[in-house]
Amino acid sequence: MPWCPKCGAEFRPGFTECNTCHIPLIDHKPDGTETIPAPDPAEERARRRDRRRQRALRVLQTLIVILLALAAVFLLQGNG
């Protein structure tokens, strides 16, 4: 089972990176002697930008659903 050397979380086989720490996983339970690689600043910026973009898209999708629901309510009220 893969393990995160930083937070100690255990992952299912197939995972290669900790979803919290964003560092490569190791193949054994961490015992405190593992070295943790320093994050690449360019990758961190790209990851933050992607998270912001995904958050903005979720907000936009939610607003579209709300607007469509309101439009449906007003159209149905007009026919009644």
Image (cartoon, helix red, strand yellow):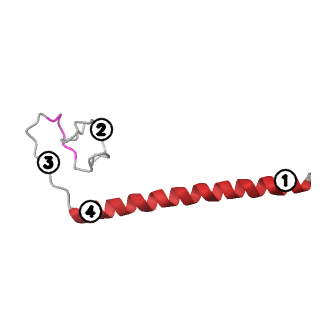
Residue 2, above or below 46: above
Residue at x 10%, y 36% (from the top left corner): 32
Which disc is residue 49 wearing? none
The three-letter amino acid code for the residue at tag 4 is: Glu
Along the horizontal axis of the image, is 6 left or right of 12? left
User: Along the polypeptide, which appears first: circle 3 or circle 4?
Assistant: 3
Q: What residue would you read off at disc 1? A: 76
The three-letter amino acid code for the residue at tag 1 is: Leu
Percent position (x, y) of residue 60? 56, 60
User: Along the polypeptide, which appears first: circle 1 or circle 2?
Assistant: 2
Asked whether 22 or 67 is in front, the reply is 67
Along the horizontal axis of the image, is 75 left or right of 48? right
Q: Secondary structure at mark 3?
A: loop
- Distance (Cα) linking label 3 and label 1: 59 Å
Asked if labels 1 and 4 touch by Cβ distance under 8 angstroms, the answer is: no
Location of the N terminus by quadrant is top left
Residue 31, above or below 54: above
Which disc is residue 43 wearing? 4
- Distance (Cα) linking label 3 and label 2: 17 Å
User: Along the polypeptide, which appears first: circle 3 or circle 2?
Assistant: 2
Along the horizontal axis of the image, is 34 left or right of 14? left
- Distance (Cα) linking label 4 and label 2: 22 Å
Q: What residue would you read off at disc 2? A: 11
User: Along the polypeptide, which appears first: circle 4 or circle 2?
Assistant: 2
Quarter of the figure with residue 28:
top left
Q: Secondary structure at mark 4?
A: helix
Q: What residue would you read off at disc 3? A: 36
- Distance (Cα) linking label 4 and label 1: 49 Å
Residue at x 22%, y 63% (from the top left corner): 41
**Which stretch did the figure color magenta?**
25-30
